[in-house]
Image: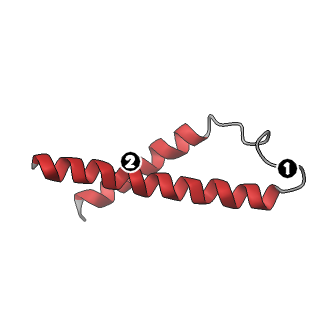
């Protein structure tokens, strides 16, 4: 397995832990639970992708991996 896979796993745990602190109930309209969950899921996937690729590019630029 590559180092990027382990970086994805580590970043996934970090993003889930960080997003757990957000109270999203006040942001969305009432009775829009499914839309709020889909948005929350897509936001999490996007953050995981962006943070992982940032760290990976940073490390490959500095030649640590």
> In the displayed image of the protein, which residue is found farthest to the top?
21
Disc 1 element: loop
Q: Nearer the viewer, residue 55 or 65?
A: 55
Badge number at residue 10: 2
Disc 2 to disc 1, C-alpha distance = 33 Å
Specify whether residue 35 is in view.
yes
Task: Place residue 26 in its image quadrant.
Answer: top right
- The residue mark sitting in front, 2 or 1, is 1
Q: Is residue 34 rendered to the left or right of residue 6?
A: right
Disc 2 element: helix
Q: Which residue is mark 1?
A: 29
Instruction: Name the image quarter holding the N terminus.
Output: bottom left
Tell me the crowding category of disc 1: few under 14, some 14 to 19, or many 20 or more residues within 10 angstroms, Cα based.
Answer: few
Q: Residue at x 62, y 39 (%)?
A: 20
Specify whether residue 65 is in view.
no
Badge number at residue 9: none
Task: Choose the circle earlier in sequence order: 2 or 1.
Answer: 2
> In the displayed image of the protein, which residue is found farthest to the right?
31
Where is residue 43 shown, x and y percent of the image? 57, 54
Q: Residue at x 71, y 56 (%)?
A: 37
Q: Is residue 56 rendered to the left or right of residue 25?
A: left
Where is residue 29 shown, x and y percent of the image? 85, 49
Q: Residue at x 90, y 54 (%)?
A: 31
Q: Residue at x 26, y 53 (%)?
A: 56
């Amino acid at each position: 397995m590559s180092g990027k896979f382990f970086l994805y796993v580590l970043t996934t745990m970090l993003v889930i832990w960080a997003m757990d602190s957000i109270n999203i109930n006040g942001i969305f309209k009432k009775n829009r639970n499914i839309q709020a969950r889909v948005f929350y899921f897509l936001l999490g996937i996007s953050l995981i992708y962006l943070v992982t690729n940032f760290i990976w590019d940073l490390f490959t630029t500095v030649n640590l991996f």
